[in-house]
Amino acid sequence: MGNIHGHSFRIATFGESHGPAIGVVIDGCPPRVPLDPGFLRSELARRRPGQSALTTQRKEGDEPEILSGVSSDGLTLGTPIAIVIRNADQRSSAYAEMRTAYRPSHADYTYDAKYGVRAVEGGGRSSARETAARVAAGAVAKTVLRHACGARITAWVESVSDVRMPDATRTPTLRQVEASPTRCPHPATARRIEELIKSARADGDSVGGVICCAIENLPVGLGSPVFDRFEADLAKAMLSLPATKGFEIGSGFAGTLMRGSAHNDVFVRRGGRIRTETNRSGGTQGGITNGETVVFRVAFKPTATVLRAQRTVGPDGKAKQLTARGRHDPCVLPRAVPIVEAMAALVAADHWIRDRGQNAPFGRCGRKA
């Protein structure tokens, strides 16, 4: 059913949007990692609904309950970590009409066609509500990476619709990202994005955009050169998120406009290690991390639910008109920032553990980042 992610650091999420709870089981977390419940709560607070006037007004506290895998003094045990998050603010009545009308660009029709049954209320497993479980698991993965190699993951809103911030010359700080409810770290652009989202909401419509993410301080050597390329696993992880429609790493599609001689990242020796003068590769070469910052972008479509009448059909194929109700984000990007970070952390932690398992017994675990 596709509810499991990862190889050595594995997660399985469970629960529906309007069910009693959602949650995650994390298998493969190393023992003796100090896990801070406050950090877990703060990560979920960045994703939770109702946090600003730009997001859905569904009220969920998203208070995590750690059921297993952590000792009384806060150290991971090396056993499965189970985390549950109770749903508190369901309004299932808002979805009654969806039983007889498929919402445009939602998973209603494909779920019915594939399984013959679906959770109508809120979209069930296809709802972005499920991503709270991913953020909880990502908080654990971030903690593992921080203690293992000092890796830091930062995502931010780079553009919404046609409003785009200038290219960042360095990775913004968490404080800069969190300074605006848009999570765009460029103040002038953030103000324009905020007005754009408010305008779309007033029109009963929605907008999409692009999130940029940087993974700093990863060691050299994560990933492999064929099917399990680091960037390939990143792409799958990002495109598994609701509303995603595109992924690029490094120069991405813009690199197609350059010649190879200009695009190549020249190797140099700097600070006692091999580096590259530029980072158009985005921190990976041949599917393996090269020690530079991993930089990638994810495109999110406009939210599929819009508060205006749309043409559709029902399960019987008859034409209908549907006006969505319920509480929805006019733009998913501000709340998607911590979700992108979480998925990046899960991929990086998984590859770090896999690399150590393969290479540590033969002396390669000591190589420099």
Image (tube, rainbow, N blue to C red):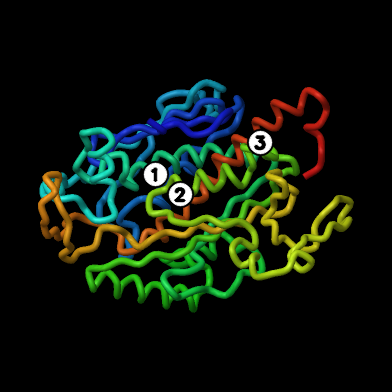
Residue 58 shown left or right of residue 325 in the figure = right
Does 110 sit above or below residue 266?
A: above
> Residue 343: where, in percent of width, then height?
51, 44
Identity of the amino acid at label 3? Answer: Trp
**Residue displayed at 36% across by 50% down:** 48
Label of residue 338 in the image: none
Q: Marks 1/3: CA distance?
A: 23 Å
The first of marks 1 and 2 along the sequence is 1
Q: Which residue is mark 1?
A: 131
> Residue 165: where, in percent of width, then height?
53, 73
> Residue 191: where, in percent of width, then height?
43, 76
Comparing 43 with 271, the one in front is 271
Tell me how many marks there are.
3
Identity of the amino acid at label 2? Answer: Ile
Residue 248 shown left or right of residue 24 in the figure = right
Q: Residues within 10 Å of mark 2 (few under 14, many from 20)?
A: many
The answer to whether residue 72 shows anywhere in this view is no
Q: Which residue is mark 2?
A: 339
Q: Quadrant of residue 67?
A: top left
Residue 257 shown left or right of residue 49 in the figure = right
Farthest front residue in view: 317
Q: Marks 1/2: CA distance?
A: 7 Å
**Residue displayed at 76% across by 28% down:** 359
Q: Marks 2/3: CA distance?
A: 20 Å
- Asked if the residue at tag 2 contacts the one at tag 1, i.e. Cβ–Cβ closer than 8 Å, the answer is yes
Quarter occupied by the C terminus: top right
Identity of the amino acid at label 1? Answer: Thr
Label of residue 352 in the image: 3
The first of marks 1 and 3 along the sequence is 1
Kind of element beneath mark 1: helix
**Residue displayed at 47% across by 51% down:** 338
Quarter occupied by the N terminus: top left
